[in-house]
Image: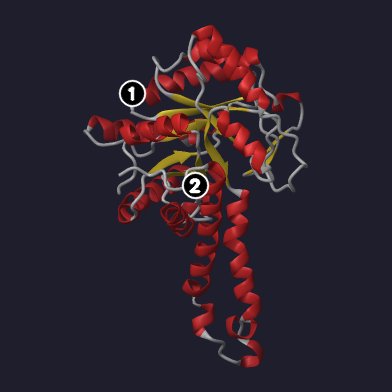
């Protein structure tokens, strides 16, 4: 199947919300991690989302080039070629983009998609994330409103964050304070400014204690009941059941019950990066340690080409990451939900 069309992506979200499951959104930085993600989704019989952060896009452009738009476009175009060989739908998304990076990342990508749509093609990306968590809610929503007017014209879904995620990702650190918990008032104001879809479709990361990074279960104090409270109160005012299509950020170390509760309250997308990074790297370590005398030219020897060929350890890395993605699909209930 090709990369999801705007209509297919919208249907994916609707089916997840109605069916009580969510899609893993996997951060990718290379063709290898993209291939691993595609394999994982296919093995699980699940549609899915792959996403590229600003740092991931810089890396993909070449570590000495560091051009975010070049890297994002390259991975998106590569995905459009290779995804055709997999029997699932995959949406392309860009992850956290802060205010100071809009003009060097999301805005140029929206322009590229608009040009494609004007030619009768699908947008390059299915959705983009605007991360206004570091600024006041009112400014965050005003920028979101302006972005929504452009993403809707380009047949793109906008992702916003109302509240803040703590911890560190891609060199951006969020403080661990009261902003980790979105309020009902924040939810109400979001609907007042952005509407319920009539101005364009958007999905929302409401925060309930989320923290980026690697933690053992129990360290991060998640309160998914906040999502229910916001959905209930906002739904009551606007006469719509669970008005928000929710996104779960900072999920590493979450318990199965916390994940299940979040999905029950309207989460349709859960970002996964830290855990898949480890799942990709761990088999490489195993390969290098077991083949130490083959991957290194010790004492003047020639080593063993079969063990230092990047494909030999790359296959193991991709398999490890794919297996972790299957596990994520199981936790989120998306296994076997793909519809042709």
From the viewer's side, name the closer residue of 156 and 210. Answer: 210
In this rendering, position of residue 248 left or right of residue 51: right
Whole-angstrom CA distance, mark 2 to mark 1, is 24 Å
- Mark number for residue 162? none
Q: Position of residue 73 (x, y in %)?
A: 39, 45
Q: Residues within 10 Å of mark 1 (few under 14, many from 20)?
A: some
Above or below 242: residue 46: below
* Contact, mark 2 vs mark 1 (Cβ under 8 Å): no
In this rendering, position of residue 253 left or right of residue 269: right
Residue 108 at least partly seen? no
Earlier in the chain: of badge 2 and badge 1, it is: 2
From the viewer's side, name the closer residue of 115 and 40. Answer: 40
Q: Position of residue 313 (x, y in %)?
A: 53, 72
Residue appearing at x 27%, y 32% in the figure: 117
In this rendering, position of residue 81 left or right of residue 107: left
In this rendering, position of residue 239 left or right of residue 73: right
SS for dot 1: helix
- Mark number for residue 57? 2
Question: Farthest left residue?
Answer: 120
SS for dot 2: helix
| Placement of the C terminus among the 4 image quadrants | top left
Q: Position of residue 303 (x, y in %)?
A: 57, 87
Q: Quadrant of residue 283?
A: bottom right
* Number of the front mark, 2 or 1: 1
Q: Position of residue 82 (x, y in %)?
A: 34, 55
Residue appearing at x 63%, y 57% in the figure: 278
**Residue with the mark numbered 1:** 153
């Amino acid at each position: 199947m090709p990369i999801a069309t705007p209509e297919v992506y919208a249907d994916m979200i609707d089916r997840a919300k109605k069916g009580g499951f969510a899609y893993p959104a996997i951060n990718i930085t290379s063709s290898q991690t993209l291939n691993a993600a595609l394999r994982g989704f296919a093995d699980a019989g699940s549609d899915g989302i792959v996403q590229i952060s600003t740092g991931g896009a810089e890396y993909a452009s070449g570590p000495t080039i560091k051009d975010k738009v070049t890297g994002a476009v390259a991975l998106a175009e590569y995905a459009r070629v290779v995804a055709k060989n997999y029997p699932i739908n995959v949406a392309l998304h860009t992850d956290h983009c802060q205010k100071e990076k809009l003009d060097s990342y999301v805005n140029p990508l929206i322009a590229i998609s608009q040009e494609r749509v004007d030619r009768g093609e699908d947008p390059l990306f299915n959705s983009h994330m605007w991360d206004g968590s570091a600024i006041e809610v009112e400014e965050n929503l005003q920028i979101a409103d302006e972005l929504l007017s452009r993403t809707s014209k380009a047949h793109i879904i906008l992702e916003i964050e109302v509240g803040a995620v703590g911890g560190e990702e891609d060199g951006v650190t969020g403080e661990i304070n009261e902003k980790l918990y979105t309020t009902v008032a924040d939810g109400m104001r979001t609907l007042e400014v952005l509407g319920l879809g009539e101005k364009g479709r958007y999905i929302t990361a409401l925060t309930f204690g989320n923290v980026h990074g690697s933690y053992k279960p129990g360290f991060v104090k998640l309160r998914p009941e906040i999502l229910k409270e916001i959905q209930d109160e906002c739904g009551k005012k606007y006469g719509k059941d669970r008005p928000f299509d929710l996104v779960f950020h900072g999920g590493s170390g979450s318990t199965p019950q916390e994940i299940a509760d979040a999905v029950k309250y309207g989460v349709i997308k859960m970002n996964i990066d830290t855990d898949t990074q480890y799942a990709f790297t761990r088999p490489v370590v195993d390969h290098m340690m077991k083949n130490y005398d083959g991957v290194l030219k010790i004492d003047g020897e020639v080593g063993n080409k079969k063990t230092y060929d990047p494909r030999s350890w790359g296959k193991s890395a991709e398999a490890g990451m794919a297996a972790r993605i299957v596990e994520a699909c199981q936790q989120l209930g998306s296994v076997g939900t793909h519809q042709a």
